[in-house]
Image: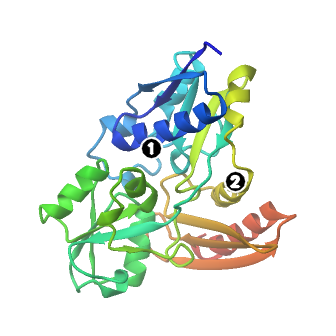
Amino acid sequence: MDKVLVIGTRPGRLAQAQAELVAGAIRQRWPDLCCKISAIATAGDIDQRTALWELRGRPDQQGFFTSQVERALAAGQIDLAVHSLKDLPTRQADGLVIAAVMDRAFPEDCLVCNGPANGIQDLPSGIRIGTSSLRRAAQVSSIRPDLQVIPIRGNVETRLARLDSGQVEAVLLARAGLERLGLAYRITTILDPRRFIPAPGQGALAVQVRSDDQATYQIASAIDDAKTRLLVEIERQVLVYTGCGCHAPLGAFAQIIEDTLHLYGFMADPQGKNPILARLTGRLDRPFALARQLANELLKVNR
């Protein structure tokens, strides 16, 4: 196979590392295929100042980290796109389809600070904790209202630099990003995703192709992990049923234990107030019914 497969993704070390993971998985199955990675800046890469929770209601909120890459894919400038699934709007862009969701190893959030702590409850009173996510901010405030939540933007290294320079005393980050960048040694503690609920689809990588490009779909679909795809689709259906956007204060985490589906959710109002945690278990043959039920439970408090 002499085709060169052009993989589009965001600039930055983490996005490039994630694209390399996809390229490596594809090469394992198609050894003669040459993969080239193309960096495409998104609105979220260009605007490094606006706190993500200030985007709610803005017309450009949807696809803040994905739309430019999707446009390049639709225009044929790249053959496939690699996204952090949590950033991808639940409604697919016309003419595009998710061909693969890679195996997800690290769905959790984690705490990074300069001193020992077994969790958010162990942090000293009044310290500044940085995050770019209203979901994380709302959960921190519900656990420790005495902490100062500071909005910080930028890539993983930039946020760690804010910690190292003393601008904040702790930061909350996705574990997957630190693991993929070889920075897992910076993790102070990993937060239980059943109690500190991650974003829907967090830690999963989505591989997107044009719906009319069957050749590339066949290549990409070979790296799809069916179990991960099911779990993240359940989580993202919670997002759909609540009517929230990607950056809303909502979390969902699904796991399968033996033959039972366990689904955990968190939601707060648009200002991050009135938080609620919910947990349901159900049958594997009706996963999206459980997602709708969880969404209804969350909406009871936040209507």
The amino acid sitting under disc 1 is Arg
Amino acid carrying label 2: it is Glu
Q: Quadrant of residue 42?
A: top left
Residue at image position (12%, 61%) is: 165
Q: Which of 164 and 140 is in front in this view?
A: 164
Question: Residue 189 at what x, y percent from top left?
Answer: 37, 75
Q: Position of residue 128 (x, y in %)?
A: 22, 72
| Label disc, if present, on residue 58 of the rendered structure | 1
Labels 2 and 1 touching (C-beta < 8 A) = no
Q: Quadrant of the N terminus?
A: top right
Q: Is mark 2 on a helix, strand or loop?
A: helix
Left or right of 73 in this view: 42: left
Where residue 275 appears, as percent x and y from the top left, is: 50, 77
Name the secondary structure under disc 1.
Answer: loop
Residue 119 vs residue 72: left or right?
Answer: left
Quadrant for the C terminus in the image? bottom right
Above or below, comparing residue 261 to residue 154 in the picture: below
Left or right position of 140 against 157:
right
**Residue 13 appears in which quarter of the rendering?**
top left
Residue 202 in picture, x, y percent from top left: 53, 57
- 242 over 37 or under it: above or below: below
* Residue at image coords 55%, 65%: 251
Query: Badge 2, how many Cα within 10 Å: few under 14, some, many 20+?
Result: many
Tell me the residue that label 2 is attached to. Answer: 233
- Of tags 2 and 1, the one toward the viewer is 2
Quadrant for residue 302, please give it: bottom right
Residue at 79% across, 63% down: 287
Can the viewer see residue 271 in this picture?
A: no
